[in-house]
Amino acid sequence: MRIHHLNCGCMCPVGGKLWDGVSPGLTGHLICHCLLVETDNSGLVLVDTGFGSRDVEDPYERISPLFIHTNRIQLEHRYTALEQVRSLGFSPRDVRHIVLTHLDFDHAGGLEDFPEATVHILRAEIEEAEVRHGFIHRRRYSPRQWDEVRDWRFYDPTGEGWFGFRSVRDLDGLPPEILMIPLPGHTMGHAGIAIETPEGWLLNAGDAYFHRHEMDEDPSCTPGLRAYQKLMEEDRPLRLHNQDRLRALANDGRSNVKIFCSHDPVELEALQRLSTGWRPISGQYHPNLRAH
């Protein structure tokens, strides 16, 4: 398998380094870290989609104005998975599977750009998204982003153990090297996606954490991201418990698991530089963002 690390969203909230820890100006820089996986027999697999082409064309019909303006979402076609798949020389029809960490507006916006794909998700997530109870639920989930999806695969939290995590399972029609790991807390159907590579495991932890230093032995987080996580959490004790488990894994030198989250631009750039599939978008990164 070949893995491409994509940025399928750009957000520039006011506050600079209070968000990302490094931006020197008035605005911070957050991204939507997605994966495009070239498999031998299952076509292309996307892990999350970020914002989609329809979000760019008609944002207020598909994304809550609260998040458009608070996050200062930069809606441009160049950031969509659709454009990046094409720039790598593929057709949207080559994307046969999409695996979602969860259904938040900044992870599922591109689903309808790939109508041939089967969409894989934990059953608890689609159930929560369909109910949409409460102020945040009605704004974090946008059924317009997925109401044309024709082929879903829903999974219950059953499976095997994996580095101390339970109910880890493979997915229908996908290689056994791709696993879904329940990581509830941010949402109740939130999951991480692990991929086994010749160099070890990659674990996309989604929104189980937001800032790279949350995985340090002595963890820290910026004020902006700490507040945002609290705003969006469904179950704080469960979210923090799963962060603790991820942190222990990240600092276990025997595991050979590389963990990253969805919105940290420093993590993304570091992984793109290590990947043979690195194709940066011009102007995608703030010049002062460096892995540290």
Image (cartoon, grey):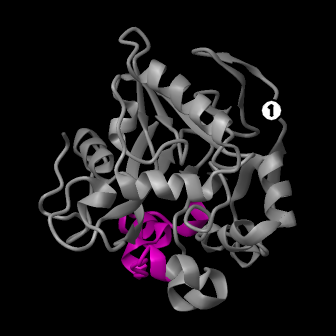
Image coordinates of residue 184 in percent, x first then y, are: 69, 40
- The residue sitting at 76% across, 39% down in the picture is 172
Residue 136 visible in the picture? yes
Label 1 Cα crowd, 10 Å radius (few <14 / some 14-19 / many 20+): some
8 is higher (above) or lower (below) than 250: below
Q: Is residue 174 magenta-colored?
A: no
Q: Position of residue 115 (x, y in %)?
A: 69, 70
Amino acid beneath label 1? Pro
Q: Is residue 282 left or right of residue 167?
A: left
Number of disc labels: 1
Q: Residue at x 35, y 12 (%)?
A: 253
In the picture of the structure, the residue carrying the numbered disc 1 is 157
Depth check: give the residue in front, 180 or 15.
15
Based on the picture, tell me whether residue 93 belongs to the magenta stretch.
Answer: yes
Question: Taking 207 as reference, is 88 above or below it?
Answer: below
Q: At 34% across and 72% down in the image, what residue appears? A: 12
Q: Can the viewer see residue 47 in this picture?
A: no
* Quadrant (top left, top right, bottom left, bottom right) of the C terminus: top left
- Of residues 198 and 127, the one drawn nearer to the viewer in this rendering: 127
**Which residue is depicted at the point 57% across and 15% down?**
163
Q: Is 148 placed left or right of 11 in the picture? A: right
Secondary element type, mark 1 = loop
Residue 4, horizontal then vertical, whole percent = 39, 49
For the residue pair 109 and 83, the one nearer the viewer reads as 109
Q: Position of residue 60 (x, y in %)?
A: 60, 89
Looking at the image, residue 285 lies above or below residue 257: below
| Region rendered in magenta | 69-95
Above or below residue 12? Residue 290 is above
